[in-house]
């Protein structure tokens, strides 16, 4: 994905030099890219933290527990998976259209579900929202979380342990997942609008009323690579994971330096 950046930069320079684009359009494009990247970083690091307290327990002669912590729920739990699933399913009509080129039904369906068309965008957003909830229900089980919390003496203040805790966590998770689904839909759709435009003049009955809108709204700006929502999600996600791993390595080196040779010997014996 990143390897296409030089070609994209050369394309921008060529269009600017040949006056196909004005400097204002380039500034707007770059500004929107920076804003989208900043928005992705902000949401990917966002969490909904549920306060959890642990009751004190006497184990032998020691008093265990009595701590206060939190249960973090990421806004975007599913990552880029819902976008990939939704886009993959929408390729099926194109496949049927190629398999049955003489069928008028499949031809009309292929034309209506062509990439960038209003119906395609509507089904794309719907699919992203559906797969956000579907994938979250697979990787996160509120009942299991509540059981583990009760097993170790944890509870949410004001919520009864067990079934009530599971229902409370599921309610919070549903709201957080909805916010994450809207975020993924915006990231996936808005850049596509910049590439291909809104195409709202293709809508039946009312489409002709939008023919006089500016061309960049109807047909996009023709930028083919670096403004793709899925591409930005993958690049930013990998970059953030790399930064976290580097920070973890720096913390380990800091502890090695703090403990000195004795600390390294102790860790070596444990290993």
Image (cartoon, rainbow, N blue to C red):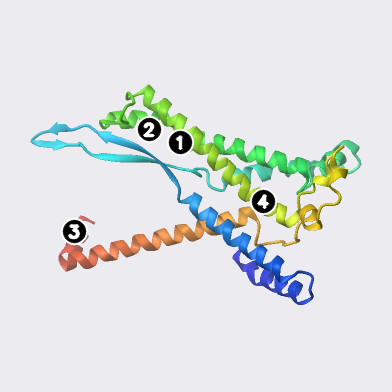
Camera-nearest label, 3 or 1: 1
Which quarter of the picture shows residue 259?
bottom left
Work out which quarter of the rendered image holds the C terminus and state it. bottom left
* Picture disc at residue 145: 2
Front residue (pair 206, 114) = 206
Residue hosting label 3: 269
The answer to whether mark 3 and mark 1 are in CB contact below 8 A is no
Residue plotted at (50% across, 34% down): 175
Quadrant where the N terminus sits is bottom right
Inter-mark Cα distance, 1 to 4:
29 Å
Foreground tag (4 vs 3): 4
In what element is the residue under mark 1?
Answer: loop
Calculate the distance from the C-alpha at mark 3 to the C-alpha at mark 1: 37 Å
**In the displayed structure, does residue 169 sit left or right of residue 237?**
left
Question: Residue under circle 4?
Answer: 190
Contact (Cβ within 8 Å) of mark 1 with mark 4: no
Element assignment for label 4: helix
The mark that comes first in sequence, 4 or 3, is 4
Query: Alpha carbon of mark 4 to alpha carbon of mark 2: how far?
Result: 36 Å
Dot in front, 4 or 2: 4
Frontmost of labels 1 and 4 is: 4
* Observer-nearest of 27 and 254: 27
Q: Position of residue 136 (x, y in %)?
A: 51, 37
Residue indicated by mark 1: 140
Say whether residue 146 is left or right of residue 183. Answer: left
Instruction: Choose the circle earlier in sequence order: 3 or 1.
Output: 1
The CA span between labels 2 and 1 is 8 Å
Residue sitting at x 20%, y 36%: 66
Neighbour tally class for label 3: few under 14, some 14-19, many 20 plus, Cα within 10 Å: few
| Outermost residue to the left | 61
Residue 106 in the image: state x and y as whole percent.
Answer: 85, 38
């Amino acid at each position: 994905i990143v390897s296409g950046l030089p070609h994209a930069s050369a394309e921008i320079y060529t269009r600017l030099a040949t006056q196909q684009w004005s400097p204002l359009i380039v500034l707007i494009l770059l500004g929107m890219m920076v804003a989208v990247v900043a928005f992705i970083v902000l949401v990917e690091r966002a969490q909904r933290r549920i306060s959890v307290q642990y009751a004190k327990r006497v184990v032998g002669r020691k008093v265990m527990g009595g701590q206060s912590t939190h249960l973090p729920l990421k806004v975007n739990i599913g990552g880029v998976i819902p976008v990939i699933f939704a886009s993959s399913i929408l390729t099926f009509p194109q496949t049927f259209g190629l398999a049955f080129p003489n069928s008028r039904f499949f031809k009309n369906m292929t034309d209506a579900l062509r990439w960038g068309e209003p119906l395609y965008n509507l089904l794309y957003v719907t699919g992203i929202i559906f797969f956000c909830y579907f994938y979250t229900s697979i990787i996160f089980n509120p009942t299991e979380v509540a059981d583990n919390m009760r097993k170790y003496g944890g509870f949410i203040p004001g919520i009864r342990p067990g079934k009530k805790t599971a229902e409370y966590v599921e309610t919070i998770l549903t709201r957080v997942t909805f916010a994450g689904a809207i975020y993924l839909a915006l990231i996936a759709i808005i850049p596509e609008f910049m590439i291909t435009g809104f195409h709202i003049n293709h809508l039946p009955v009312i489409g002709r009323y939008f023919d006089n809108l500016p061309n960049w709204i109807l047909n996009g700006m023709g930028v083919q690579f670096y403004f793709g929502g899925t591409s930005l999600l993958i690049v930013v996600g990998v970059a953030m994971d790399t930064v976290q791993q580097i920070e973890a390595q720096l913390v380990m080196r800091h502890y090695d330096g703090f403990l000195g040779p004795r600390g390294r010997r102790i860790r070596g014996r444990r290993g």
